[in-house]
Image (spheres, helix red, strand yellow):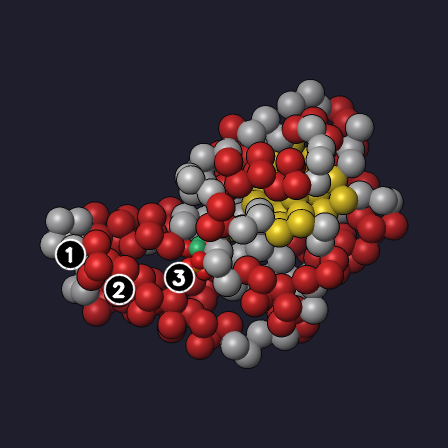
Amino acid sequence: MLKGLIFDLDGVITDSARYHLAAWNALAEELGIKLPAKASDELRGLARMDSLELILRYGHQENKYSLAEKEALAAKKNMAYQQAIKKMTQADILPGISELLEQAKTNGLKMAIASASMNAPTILKQLGLLKEFDAVVDPKTLSHGKPNPEIYQKAQALLDLEADEVISFEDAASGVAAIKAAKQFAVGIGDSQVLGQADLVVSDTSQLDLTKIVATFKSKKV
Ligand code: BG6
Ligand code: MG
């Protein structure tokens, strides 16, 4: 029986994913690295240092910097990102999300955030949504990033639920892979070719219909 919903944040609750990408693209350019178009999808969902490593690999620079230098590069990206998200408000909640959260609450569903971002609490506060969630996973407590299932398992544990009692929402292929590895029902938001592993894919958040999602959840044994 469905008892809870687990959400990624960037690209699901709000479009902060574009600020992450813009900040990474700026850093890549500075390092003289030309990222292929597919890097945008690959970077979605990846933890901060995993994202930097991916970018450096594209530039064949994975052995060029010391750990301290890499940390400085990641901190530089984070400063640009934090500058960009400063102006976010309630108006930046993606279409259909407020309605979905409201409906879930009315139906007594528990809710958690499973974001790899250390900036997630700041964004949730700016969107006025921090109090809507029963739990927010702290990525600092995790050993592995997405696509490892750890973050979704942690969110589920914080809600005190079983894998077959939750539905999880993601915009990244790495995130959908994490949800499926956690044996949960996955709703993908975005391109169905990229998110093919999900149990259900919608093109954008305005297409999220809890009644329909629950019907598919009930008809499908994960
Ligand atoms: C994820 C984003 O939610 O958080 C990634 O999809 C990002 O793009 C990751 O790299 C880590 O975020 P932060 O804010 O801790 O650097
Ligand atoms: Mg995301």
Question: Does any atom of ligand 1 lie closer than 8 Å to the CB of label 3?
Answer: yes
Q: Residue at x 53, y 57 (%)?
A: 10
The kind of residue on which mark 1 rests is Tyr
Residue matched to label 3? 21
Place of residue 54 in the rendered image (x, y in percent of width and height, measured from the top left): 28, 48
Q: Is residue 219 above or below residue 142?
A: above
- Nearest the viewer among 186 and 182 is 182
Question: Does any atom of ligand 1 lie closer than 8 Å to the CB of label 1?
Answer: no
Q: Nearer the viewer, mark 1 or mark 3?
A: 1
Looking at marks 1 and 3 on the same chain, the residue that comes earlier in the sequence is marked by 3
Q: Is residue 166 left or right of residue 201?
A: right
Looking at marks 3 and 2 on the same chain, the residue that comes earlier in the sequence is marked by 3
* SS category of the residue bearing label 3: helix
Q: CA distance from mark 1 to mark 2?
A: 10 Å
* Residue 96 makes an appearance in the image: no
Residue matched to label 1? 65
- Nearest the viewer among 166 and 21 is 166
Residue matched to label 2? 73
Q: Quadrant of the C terminus?
A: top right
Place of residue 56 in the rendered image (x, y in percent of width and height, measured from the top left): 21, 53
The answer to whether mark 1 and mark 2 are in CB contact below 8 A is yes
The answer to whether mark 1 and mark 3 are in CB contact below 8 A is no
Q: Quadrant of the N terminus?
A: top right
Looking at marks 1 and 2 on the same chain, the residue that comes earlier in the sequence is marked by 1
